Amino acid sequence: MTKSRLFIYIIAGGYVAYTGAGLVKSAVSQRPDHYMLYLVIGLLFVVIGAFFVIKSFLKLSRGEYAEAADRFDEGRTDLAEDSRTEELPKEVSKKADKEPEREREQEGGTDNEDRNGV
């Protein structure tokens, strides 16, 4: 996870917690019909928001994040080491190169010729 993503999590978690606290405050002061439901949802927002803020802040303080350039370099080496990317046999790649030529010949010529016959 990058450093900027952790900052975004802190801001988003703070916003969710702030929204939940506002919901709890209005539910207690105004006592609407289903104030217990609003209270529970508001408290849930506060807990979830606080979780994201605390978790992201701890990762930032411990240095458990990757810089954007480091992450890009890691992605490139992962692609090179990926076992799913195998080279095609030379026979298959040669056949694939010749197929477009066959299709052009079947269409009535090559790209250099005028197809209207003029």
Image: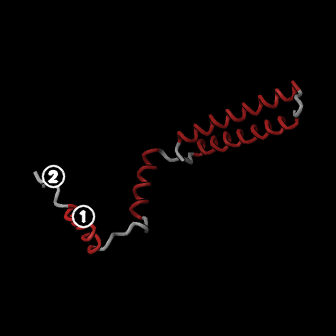
Q: Are marks 2 and 1 in contact (CB under 8 Å)?
A: no
Residue at the extreme left: 118
Residue at the extreme front: 117
The residue drawn where x is 29% and y is 72% is 92
**Circle nearer the N terminus (2, 1):** 1
The residue drawn where x is 41% and y is 52% is 73
Q: Which residue is mark 1?
A: 103
Relative side of 90 to 60, left or right: left
The residue drawn where x is 75% and y is 38% is 45
> Mark 2: which secondary structure?
loop
**The image quarter in which residue 46 lies:** top right
Q: Nearer the viewer, mark 2 or mark 1?
A: 2
> Mark 1: which secondary structure?
helix
Q: Position of residue 11 (x, y in %)?
A: 62, 34
Q: Which residue is mark 2?
A: 116
Q: Position of residue 33 (x, y in %)?
A: 89, 31
Q: CA distance from mark 2 to mark 1?
A: 18 Å
Choose between 27 and 111: the one closer to the eye: 111
Choose between 37 and 9: the one closer to the eye: 37
